[in-house]
Image: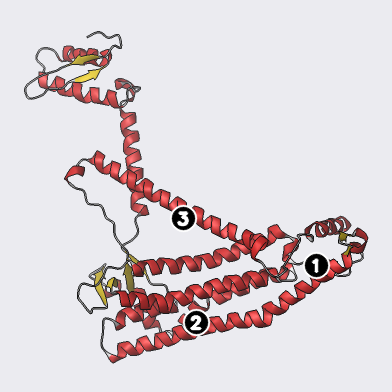
Amino acid sequence: PKANGISQRCRPTTLGLSCALRLSGDACVWCHGAAARRGEAASVDAVAMEFVVQAWRMIQSPNVTVEAGEQKPMVRRKSSINITHRDWQFLQYSKFKDLPENIYGAAMMAIIRSTQSYHGAVHGVTFCVFAGLVLNILMQFYVLWCTRLYICVPAVTRVQALYARFHESVFVDGVFSQDAWEEFPLAGSLCQIPLSQPYFFVSVLVCWTATIWVDLLESYRYMSLWWQLKKTAAEGELTQVEVSVESEDSENQSHVLLTAADRRTKVATIGMIFVPKICIALFLWWLGARWLVATTNFQDLLLNAVALAFITELDELLYHAMVPEDIQVLVRSYKIVRPQHAHVRTRHQETDDEWSEWVTRSRDRRLLYRIAAMLLAMTVIVGFPVVYIKLLQHVLPGYRWDVHDPCEARLESLMMEI
């Protein structure tokens, strides 16, 4: 063969070994050089095998020379495979999900235990837990209703009267009057309403929306887990559980895994636990956003946001106040099995390269799902407050966005005086 870069065909054929590779002339020259270096006493089979291995490396990485950099592509490829496998392991869900440590988690635990036992004491615990659940739901709805009636409605009335007074005093024949604005006695109060500084108010509303979004997302995840549970094997069986022991030396490491449930149990659980929880979260977001819009000063704006977060934590407060410690331990010991989509290596995927390729595709697909979920969360958390302020808020119906500019000029003049 000629060492001029023209592709040639090399056929080192020996006992039981035959290869036909279209390579550059340099590879064939290397083959002859290796044979010459080994001498006539060298084994032809060994020379041919060494040639095939080295030629294959040159095909995979033609820009890397054999002497100086033959290890670099192999190391880089191995590192990439290791990163892919680590990503795949981290992206895998655990086999089960813990129940939440609040009154809703205790209710789920009670449902699982009652469907597995016929003892009166077990049903007594279930009755007490569901009494606490009903109390929590009634308390949250009652607090929200009183907040709307005794706090939100008067605040909306005050801010509407303030905005109407602004238009009556400052606008002359529908045109803004700077002289009337300078003499307006309620300018300081008007410039404290949240809509006078829309960017700051959107930031506060984004934080409030993120708080409710976390609650809604948790409810959706548990609803999805319950609905995706397998159907029970026996007719008339409500639930199926398995006991998982992580350590044989300690009984505290044992878990009760809910693996299957019939349709009636799923519907009852979702209807009694998650539907009220989601309704409370949505009503709380709407009431909180309306109350924040109607706040008449920025100091109360932040305090009101913190006060609203207290209502979202009422289920955890009642849980730790009413449920005994040993029942809380029971709640922590019960888990819900996640749906597993494990891939088993088949005969068509016996090689490491095919397995790595499948892992890479699965990892990339799952990362795309994660990217879509993050983009959706950011769109909802940031976009919905903007839409609410511009289109959905009815605290100041027909708001003309005519408070920001005069309040900014007033603020600048006050800053100059300081």
Are circles 1 and 3 on residues that touch, CB within 8 Å?
no
Query: Is residue 392 or residue 278 the one in the foreground?
Result: 392
> Residue placed at 31% from the left, 74% from the top?
263
Left or right for 1, reference 228 = left
Which residue lies under the disc numbered 3? 373
Residue picked out by circle 2 = 137
Please tell me which of labels 3 and 2 falls first in the chain.
2
Left or right: residue 84 versus residue 289 is left
Quadrant position of residue 80: top left
Q: Is residue 271 visible?
A: yes
> Residue flagged by tag 2: what amino acid is it?
Ile
- Is any atom of residue 43 visible in this view? no
Could you classify mark 3 by the number of other residues whose Cα lies within 10 Å: few (under 14), some (14-19), or many (20 or more)?
few
Which label is found at residue 190? 1
Callout 2: 10 Å neighbours few (<14), some, many (20+)?
Answer: some
- In the displayed orientation, state which residue is furthest to the left: 15
In the displayed structure, 89 sits above or below 232; it is above
Q: Amino acid at mark 1?
A: Leu
Position above or below: 324 against 25? below
Q: Give the distance between the C-alpha atoms of the residues marked 3 and 2, in whole angstroms.
A: 30 Å
Residue 377 position within the rendered picture, expressed as x and y whole percent measured from the top left: 51, 57
Q: What's the image's color scheme? A: secondary structure
Q: With respect to residue 354, does 343 lie above or below?
A: below
SS category of the residue bearing label 3: helix
Residue 286: percent from left, percent from top? 60, 71
Q: Image height check: is 376 above or below 310?
A: above
The answer for how far apart the CA atoms under marks 2 and 1 are is 37 Å
Q: Residues within 10 Å of mark 1 (few under 14, many from 20)?
A: many
